[in-house]
Image (cartoon, rainbow, N blue to C red):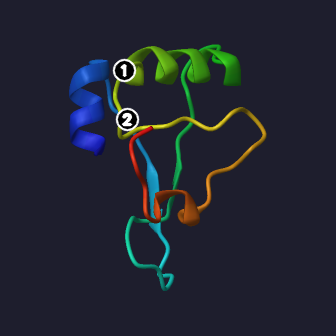
Amino acid sequence: MEALLSREAGQPVKLTFVPHLVPMSRGMLTTIYARPSGTLTAQMVQDCLASYYKGRPFVRLRPPGMPPDTLHVRRYQLL
C-alpha cells in the first residue's frame, strides 16, 4: 500500500495498517492510520471518496459519524 500510494503521491507515504482478527463470515475489518500533508479536512476526504466511488455498486460510504459494521456485508444484495 505504501509503495502504490507513494508512487501516486510522488513522495513517500507512511501508513499504519492493522488487520483485526474477528470471527466473521466475510469481509475484513482493518484500521488504517495516515497523517496527511498540508491542510485536509474530513469533508474533503468524504467528498473525494464519494466522487471516486460514485456509481460503483459494491461500495457504499457511510455518512460521517456512522462507522461501518461488519454486518453491513452480510447477505448483501444490490438494490
Which residue shows up at 41% across the image and 19% down it?
54
Instruction: Give me the C-alpha separation between circle 1 and circle 2.
Output: 28 Å
Q: Is residue 45 visible?
A: yes
User: Percent position (x, y) of residue 11?
Assistant: 31, 23
The answer to whether 13 is drawn above or below residue 33 in the figure is: above
Q: Residue furthest front?
A: 79
* Quadrant in the picture for residue 70: bottom right
Decide: few, some or many residues near mark 2? Use Cα within 10 Å; few <14, some 14-19, many ≥20: some
Q: Nearer the viewer, residue 38 or 77?
A: 77
* Quadrant in the picture for residue 45: top right
User: Percent position (x, y) of residue 22?
Assistant: 51, 82
Which residue shows up at 73% across the image and 33% down it?
64
The answer to whether 70 is drawn above or below residue 47 in the figure is: below
Q: Nearer the viewer, residue 73 or 65?
A: 73
The answer to whether 48 appears left or right of 8 in the picture is right
Which residue shows up at 35% across the image and 33% down it?
57
Q: Is residue 41 visible?
A: no
**Helix, strand or loop status at disc 2:** loop
Q: Which mark is residue 13?
A: 2
Q: Which residue is mark 1?
A: 55
Q: Quadrant of the N terminus?
A: top left
User: Percent position (x, y) of residue 40?
Assistant: 63, 17
